[in-house]
Amino acid sequence: MDSFISKSRILIVDDNSVNILLLEKLLKMSGYTQIISTTDSRTTLDLYLQYHPDLILLDLKMPYLDGFEVMEQLKNIKEEDIIPIIAMTAYDESEYRLRAFMAGARDFIGKPFDYAEVLIRIKNVLEIRIMHNDIRENNRRLLDKVEERTKELQGLQVELINRLARAAEFRDCQTGNHITRMSKYTYELGKAYGLPENDCELIYHASTLHDIGKIGIPDEILLTPSKLSPDEWEKMKTHTVKGAQILTGSTAEMLRLAEQISLYHHEKWDGSGYPFGLKGQEIPLVGRITAICDVFDALISERPYKKAWHKEDAVAEIERGRGTHFDPYLVDHFLRIVPVINEITDIYN
């Protein structure tokens, strides 16, 4: 006998102790080594949970709980595993057997026992059980590999985004801490808004590329210490579209999100923003989140053309932009998490 089959755990449930002794002797003589039995059907559920048998030989007519009631109890166990049950009955009526099949039985053993038939039916059910377990284990290993590969690809996406963000920093040495703080703000604001953790993580990474399009802006405009002329300002505004062009066409969710952020983070709630003059909820949520966080950090950051604002003044400015520059609902959430925002600014100043 196959060693896997001989080591299978078999639970016998029958109120007749003679039947149990006959089955135990037959099974042991045939090489089965792990046999559990009970004459009290009320203990079946506890025995199953304790030993997790590979097969249950279950009498259908018993006091206290009959076989159908036992199968109903076992059916309520929330497990991925199937519970192989061979019903033992002296009844020959097809309707009775059909009811047992519907209740969860996989096969039948008639009484009185035909020993050859008993062994064949047990072996057949156990072979199916072993094949089922092998398939389940193979599926589990495949899912583990898929999960591992998915994490690897996500890691590569994050690395790519970080490298692109560093490329943008080379164009403007003052953007480093701004990018770090701003991305952390977006995570916290997304969480306060009620977005799932995975979405907050995506925004956190994707928002680091909000200004990637500045790579395409000439140095004489990007690095000028003075106020830009109207013509220069129009060219500067194209960094949103340039950023989207750099990121467009990716199948990676994180980069697609970064494309949206790059394109829409300068749109305003009242429609006066750029590049498209979108209004209200026409602006994607990630663009509205990033807009608040970008402006706040720009206000508290020193630039060649301005001094850094005090945090309290910057918060007041965000509140003043409620319903004009910014999504009013998001502003409310931002104001609620100001202590967290201030903590980020203090750590990454």
Image: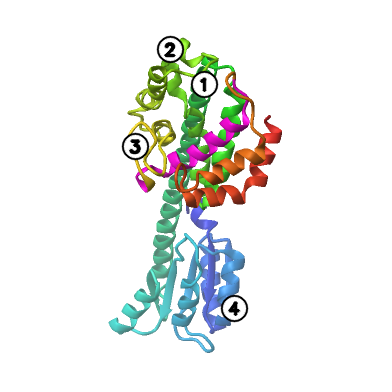
The first of marks 2 and 1 along the sequence is 1
Instruction: Tell which of 326 and 249 is nearer to you.
Output: 326
Residue type at mark 3 is Gly
**3D distance between C-alphas at marks 1 and 4:** 62 Å
Residue 163 tag number? 1
Q: Where is mark 2, residue-wise?
A: 218
**3D distance between C-alphas at marks 3 and 4:** 71 Å
Label 4 Cα crowd, 10 Å radius (few <14 / some 14-19 / many 20+)? some
Residue 277 tag number? 3
**Residue 112, quarter of the rendered image:** bottom left
Magenta region: which residues? Answer: 281-303
Residue 176 tag number? none
Q: Quadrant of the C terminus?
A: top right
Q: Where is mark 4, residue-wise?
A: 43
Label 2 Cα crowd, 10 Å radius (few <14 / some 14-19 / many 20+)? few
Please tell me whether mark 2 sits on a helix, a strand or a loop.
loop
Residue type at mark 4 is Thr
Task: Say which residue appears at 40% left-offset and 72% top-offset.
Answer: 104
Residue type at mark 2 is Pro
